[in-house]
Amino acid sequence: MRHGPSRGGPRPANDSQWTLEGRQDARRLAPGLPPLPSGTHVPSLWPMLRALLGRWRSSLRLLRPAHVEADRAKISVSQLGHRYGNKVVALKDVDLNVRSGEFVCLLGPSGCGKSTLLYALAGQVKPTGGAVSIDGRRITGPGPDRLLMFQEAALFPWLSVRGNVTFALAARGVPRKERRARAEQYIRRVQLQGFEDALPHQLSGGMKMRASLARALSVDPAVLLMDEPFGSLDAQTRIHMQEFLQSIWMRTHKTVVFVTHDVHEALMLGTRVVLMAPRPGRIVRDLEVHLPMPRHPDDAALMEMVRHVQGLLREVEQGSKPPEPPPVRVPPRPSPPTVHSVTESVRGP
Amino acid sequence: MKREGRWKGHAQKLGLVLLLLAAWEGLSRLGIWSPHLFPGPVTVAESLGRMTADGRLWEATLRSLGRLARAYLLSVAIGIPLGLLMARLAFFRNAVKPVVMGLQALPSICWLPLALLWFGLTDAAILFVVVMGSVLGIAIATEDAVNGVDPQLLRVASTLGVKGVRFQFGVLLPAALPGIVTGLKLGWSFAWRALLAGELLFVSGGLGQLLTIGRELMDVPQVMAVMVAIILIGITVDRVLFQTVEVRLRRRWGLEGAM
């Protein structure tokens, strides 16, 4: 519904202006104001200036390449590589540094290794090359400082909402007396009060996800890792959950790494968007999103950025389309890669 | 509407039972076979009433069920941990499981001669046969249930840092419980069969002995009455006990789509 057909359509004609490099050049040349387009009739100067200013803001300042040094990072990924069964290269030479308090979205078509990267951060996957560390310590397995959330709510079906939260608290060694109060607090935070004693199968999809979020937040991990957590929800609930997650993030400022293939979702939520490409899985762009929060899903600047990032993704796809002498055998894809990835990056699975 | 459907089902079931009873009664009254060898349901019911009244049936039933309960509890106590171990530990999976599968192929009553030699004509012999009949089935079903646990739940447990005893009893066991209960039900029916086979083969009191006595006295109504009693006990335990537990469990676990 919010993905209109126009977004999948042809890109604007002034193509070069949309690439990031072109814009940076423009900024370097005219640091004060953007150049006025020639040949336009000027009815009144101020509204036009303002419109231009808005344009300048959105296209130049809102998406900036991110540079984070490894020594200032909370999560540091260096030269990460992973092969499945020694054949399919899921990740190759991935470097990523995440500061504390950042909301990083890993964005890309399926097969780009974004989930593998996330699972490596969670310690669920042992990468075949490179290193992942958090606060300078190597990650060797799941730890109490990180928590992974899945596409499904994955609640324990035999426990009530409260039971799920207190069970997680018990596993983290929270004293019995504190558990109930803390569970209550987080259930209230995800607005599930009144459903404390409900069993998971009695809840709707969105409510299950919120219960799962309450369970994740209650153990207070330093880093929250989310693997397309809203991928299985309907569009309406999904927007709801995005706004909801944003409000929670604004309050807690947890470090979040969020995997998605929905461009709009990534730009809606992230303070940083990391674009990845497949074959082999790698990072192609690392952009900071300078759009104030809370963000509105229909915000014009947001929509413009979505178009821009979709263009970038398409470029990446086309760039990697002719697989020059393939070193490894890649499983056949059901449809031409371009069409496949565009529809995929716009819509859910 | 659902309720209506259930009543309709009950009515159909009852109707068929009445029809069968009527056919049975009619067949016996035709006099094709001697009424001593083919009594009608009325005669059988009279015999059943007589045995109930003089307490023979109660005594035998209590004796049989007492044995069954002891043997079954023992089977559960051995079978579930054995199943868990087979699912979780490589040694048990690689070495013990083939042995269990092999022994499972042996009908439980085949253990009786060995049991009689080892334990003599005692209750222990029967208990041994019953345990051998049900423990392996329970272990295999438990192993199956644990292996079938949703891997997502195991990943959640690992990311939440649930380990050790809390993991075994807080995640693995409850997640596998619906499957384990199905295994317990299966184990119970194995045990019930093994028990009656054992009781028939050597005289020791219990329902099996009542059957044997009926045969020796040429008392066909008694034989049939005891058969009816065995069927009724079997149905009661299976439907009332296990069915209820299973349905409740599945509903709570959200497996029945009950909203």
Image (cartoon, coloured by chain):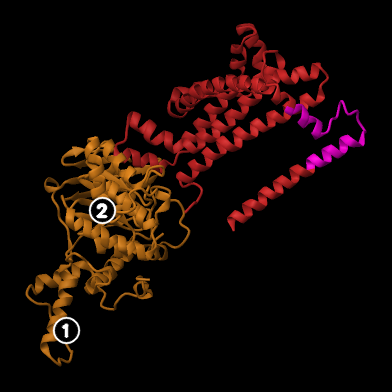
Chain colours: A orange, B red
- Residue A222 in the image: x percent, y percent? 20, 45
Helix, strand or loop at mark 1? loop
Give the answer, above or below, for where B203 lies relative to A146.
above
Query: Mark 1 belongs to which amino acid?
Result: Pro
Look at 72% across and 19% down and name the residue there.
Answer: B210
Q: Same chain for marks 2 and 1?
A: yes
Residue that label 2 marks: A188
- Cα separation, mark 2 vs mark 1, equals 53 Å
- Residue A140 in the image: x percent, y percent? 26, 36
Main secondary structure of the magenta stretch: helix
How many numbered dots are placed on residues in this image? 2
Query: Mark 2 belongs to which amino acid?
Result: Arg
Could you tell me if the residues under marks 2 and 1 are in contact, i.e. CB atoms within 8 Å?
Answer: no
Farthest residue to the left: give it. A32
**Residue B50: which quarter of the image?**
top right
Most foreground residue, B84 or A100:
B84
Look at 78% across and 20% down and name the residue there.
Answer: B214
Residue that label 1 marks: A37
- Name the N-terminal-most of marks 2 and 1: 1
Marked residue chain, label 2: A
The residue range painted magenta reads B20-49
- Residue A198 in the image: x percent, y percent? 38, 49
Asked whether residue B25 is drawn in magenta, I would say yes
